[in-house]
Amino acid sequence: MSSERLIGTLRSALSFIHSRYRLRFTRRKQLEAWQAKQLKHFLQRVLPQARRFKDLTVTDLTDLPLMDKATLMGDFTGFNTRGLSLEQVLPVARQAEESRDFSPTLGDITVGLSSGTSGNQGVFLVSALERQRWAGILLARTLPRHLMPRLLCPWRAPLRIAFFLRANSRLYTTLASRRIDFAFHDLTLGLDASLTRLNVQNPDVLVAPATVLLGLAEAVLAGRLTIRPSHILSVAEVLESADADAIHTAFGVVPQQIYQASEGFLGYTCEQGTLHLNESHLHIEPDWLDAERTRFQPIITDFSRRTQMIVRYRLNDILRVAETPCACGRVERAIAAVEGRADDVLWLPDLAGRQLLALYPDVLRRALLMHGASLQEYEIHQQGLHWQINLRTADDHASLCAALSASVHALCAQQGLQPPALSFGHWQAPPPHAKRRRLKLLQLPEGLPCTY
């Protein structure tokens, strides 16, 4: 092993130990004190290295304005500490996308493109040091205890990980080592192209978007796939309860979740099956969407990053908080669900026609799940006061359309909403590399204010 690779492995190992065994807070005040210490160093020593912040003296995080993807892309050079421009990094990312060779870097910097599900694609930068730390943090937060010997004991076979995503990255392949057999599967090639290699590897850990896990589950039930992973992680998409049940049935393993985006490693599932925000490495301000404080959009500051500044970055995701503390004892905020993006929320007028009220994704999904196995797939697109519902069923299409229409009208009556005009069509499968988005707001109804 080269000295450079040895140093990288040691960094990942130290990050693993620090995250798994030292950053275990038993009281919320302990966590907040840790965050305050890290933020102070970040604001004083790291942030001024980026041109956007070099002339600012910041003592309180809330003194800084909010940012989002458009802000970041509009002043890309100003938001990174290497002074890299968009013109410098975009060719590297686009060449990787076209060639499907994701190994080239810009010096020690990995350049990646986000998937662009919110409508505009973003660019992220990660240094070699950050990649190595990320690998340690990810394994510390997601690897179950029963697989630890495969990682740590040299006389055991290496830990085998199969990873499915639209695009690979040096960020992910940093996980590969003598103790980890890491295999990337390119979703742009389709699932069938991966089945033989997947059977040969027989992974211990399977990581993929929910729709891909469903496709692999179908291959298992059809006898085309013989793998038996002991740990399954859903990434990149909302994991619905029906999906989780189908995956569990096929593999005999309850899928867990990783909440990861180009903006950072945001959350992980604990041993109790609860999703926790990764607050020992991030500061997260909740922007509450309702008076009851049950849902929020996260505003994140990643004080562990040193290359690309993610500071008071407002994500487009909607998180629903858990109603009770998690039995695992962690004080990092417990999340009942990542419901989707803000434009997955559909809006309808109240009964008086004075305002638009939000119909949240989980509320609508629960109503549709009442139709059971007859509703195999669906998508709803809202254009003003009109909903286009495309669905797939093994039963009579017209009968299910009528039943769904009744369910939508009943739900609207229950929520105090005027029902939309409905049109129905047939669901078409998206490309295998596309993220699933069941709900999409294309255009708000005009003339009324929105009220959460």
Image: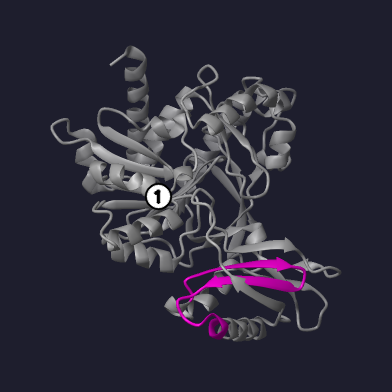
Q: Looking at the image, which is closer to me, 1 or 377?
A: 377
- Check the image and report above or below for 133 versus 195: above
Quadrant for residue 451, please give it: bottom right
Asked whether, in this view, residue 249 is left or right of residue 311, the answer is left
Query: What residue appears at the point 35 percent right and 55 percent down from the top-left corner?
Result: 216
Q: Residue extending furthest left?
A: 155
Asked whether, in this view, residue 78 is left or right of residue 367, the answer is right
Query: What residue appears at the point 25 percent right and 51 percent down from the top-left corner?
Result: 227
The amino acid marked with disc number 1 is: Leu
- Image coords of residue 4 (percent x, y): 37, 15
Quadrant of the image for the N terminus?
top left
- Tell me, yes or no, whether the highlighted magenta stretch contains residue 393: yes
Location of mark 1 (residue): 191
- Image coords of residue 175 (percent x, y): 36, 33
Asked if residue 67 shows in the view, the reply is no
- Image coords of residue 71 (percent x, y): 73, 38
What's drawn in magenta, residue-wise? 375-400
Q: Looking at the image, which is closer to me, 115 or 413?
A: 115
SS label for mark 1: helix
Query: What residue appears at the point 45 percent right and 29 percent down from the top-left corner?
Result: 170
- Check the image and report above or below for 177 versus 108: below
Label 1: how many Cα within 10 Å (few below 14, some 14–19, many 20+): some
Q: Residue extending furthest top?
A: 3
Asked whether, in this view, residue 203 is left or right of residue 169, the answer is left
